[in-house]
Image: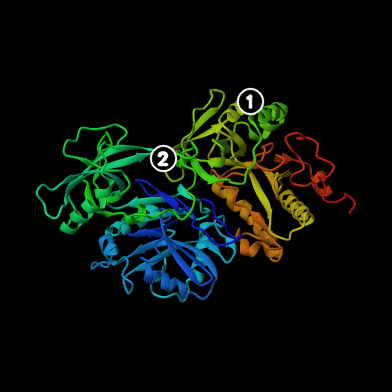
Amino acid sequence: MLTELGLGRLSFIEFQMPTLVDKPPKGRGWTHEIKYDGYRTQLIIQEGRVQAFTRNGYDWTDRYGPIVRAAAQLKTTERAIVDGEATVFGTTGRPDFQALRRELGKAESTNLIFHAFDLLHLDGNDLRDVPLLERKRTLQRFLKGAPPALIYVDHLEGDGPTVFEHACEMGLEGIVSKRADSPYRSGRQDSWLKLKCIKSDNFPIVAFVEKLGARPRRIASLYLGRRDGNRVHYAGKAQSGYSLTDAREVRERLDPLIVDKSPLAEPIDKPKATWVQPAVEAEIQYSGTTDDGLLREAVFKGLRDDLSPPAGASLVCKKPPSNESSGVPRENILQLLPDAMVPSKEELIRYWKKVAKKALVHLGRRPLKLVRHSHGITFYHKGRLPDIPDTVHQLRVQKREGGEGVRLWVDDLDGLLGLVEIGAVELHPWNTTVDDIEHADRVVIDLDPGEGIEWEMIVETALKVRDMLRSEGLDSWPKVTGGKGLHVMAPLQAVITHDDARQYARKLAQQLVSKHPDRYLLSAAPSARCGRIFLDYLRNGRGNTAVGAYSPRARSSFPIAAPVTWTQVEKGILPDAFTLESPFRPAKAAWAMRKNR
């Protein structure tokens, strides 16, 4: 999803979507919010004008009149993008999905409520890389004194199973658990988890059975599908839950979508079915699924108008790459890198043959996060992997939020070349080895400069961090990143957990912030970083990564992240001093200052 943040008018941003799971996450680092039964909505505020968009990017400004007018009354900003849920409370005092549908489009409605839970942009600052809790604190300040139609969604930081149990006892739909330190990433992510007290989801309608002899026409039941990329598979039948009004409305809504043949990837024999294009989705409540994936006790809750366009509607923006448009499934894209530049596979092969021996000291036997280039796009990879060459090893790991995942690792040149084969460009290793993935063997502090920071200040800071670590008995080494900053790496002498490593890195960074708050900060918020260095301790933690030593970068001139000496740092070595063509010796123009400055 391409936007124009900070450059021009604000554009719709594809939502971050939670992953549906069966069990709430345990342990520290999670926040929990009430899951509201409504329509996911994005408000874009700019220069006094407010627009409201649905999850699929359709403009519903006219249908959300009361919410839009309330947002226009906010006097604290000229530009903002707010993520939330539009709801209506029913007679039970809880969100009512059907009541929401009846209320849409009523210009003077006093029942529409917008529950705001995230802030993506504020007055020229893209906040998506800011940790969740900082975004929420900013959002809470932003909504202070807002009209009643705009409500800030607070969170709990208690035990996930306990919070979920209480939510279900209160008759709520469920909860959404989110990593407290996570950035905002479009698409479905494991850092947001959705848990429902009663199972429900959205399913495309693939056919209907008509009530015989009914005048006016109405449906008797619906056949449902389940999407798998471009394919739609049969998911079962919903025979109940329809009011008389629903049955008539759905029949008329599906009438222009009737087709001669089944849209299912694997046709089924349903002689009473009238097949339709799977363009309209329904919210379905169900008790479970059979072994072959069919819904048990499926009950119709309502049409999802926000997920399908009315006649003549069009998307407001370019959709992100999908397996239809790019060949890469959307669920495999953690973050798209639209401005990336990548070397050819031949260049990468020559490079790894040149540096493998030294690179494997830093990259070998470590779980890897990958930046891949495939089908013309470059992206941080997540989820299911393509076919893996035999030279690349696979490690099954337990995810923090539950369930099992796979991480790749290599231990020789053939493994590095195998990664090139699947399109890997950048390698970001964990701070641990495959021999003991639950304990960190090093810490890293990333010196990330804001606008207006001279390189000399980065050097000065790196030397201070070195001296702090030395006083702790740790012998550190520096790494230029191929970007704009510098990493200070320190091997750990004792075995500690990843959470302890992150807290240790934060404690060190906090010492500098306390002494020089005008020069350093622990917040990634862009609005606060001008003229200061962000001491990024969040690179530590289970599964958190920093770009690996000798990894190429997907940038112009193909710089690499390279280990350097403290003498080179003192002389002012620049972060893009090393390239694919010159991985061991910096170019003459790679120095910011002379040694005797």
Residue 178 lies, in percent from the top left, at 45, 54
Scheme of colours in the image: rainbow
Query: Which mark, residue 412?
Result: 1
Task: Say left or right for 14 vs 252.
Answer: right
Residue 341 lies, in percent from the top left, at 65, 41
Q: Is residue 35 visible?
A: no
Q: Nearer the viewer, residue 293 or 42?
A: 42
**Callout 1: SS:** loop
Q: Earlier in the sequence, mark 2 or mark 1?
A: 2
Q: State how many labels appear.
A: 2
Q: Nearer the viewer, residue 246 or 468?
A: 246
Q: Residues within 10 Å of mark 1 (few under 14, many from 20)?
A: some
Distance in Å between CA atoms under marks 2 and 1: 29 Å
Residue type, mark 2 in image: Gly
Residue 91 lies, in percent from the top left, at 23, 68
Q: Identify the image quadrant of residue 35.
A: bottom left
Q: Which residue reaches farthest left?
A: 213
Image quadrant where one finds the C terminus: bottom right
Residue 455 lies, in percent from the top left, at 77, 54
Q: Identify the image quadrant of residue 342.
A: top right
Q: Nearer the viewer, residue 59 or 364?
A: 59
Q: Is residue 539 visible?
A: yes
Task: Say left or right for 20 vs 580.
Answer: left
Task: Say left or right for 208 vs 174.
Answer: left
Task: Say left or right for 185 vs 277.
Answer: right
Residue at horizontal 25 percent and vertical 61 percent from the top: 98
Residue type, mark 1 in image: Asp
Q: Identify the image quadrant of residue 557.
A: top right
Residue at horizontal 52 percent and vertical 53 percent from the top: 182
Q: Residues within 10 Å of mark 2 (few under 14, many from 20)?
A: few
Q: Which residue is mark 2?
A: 403
**Callout 2: SS:** loop
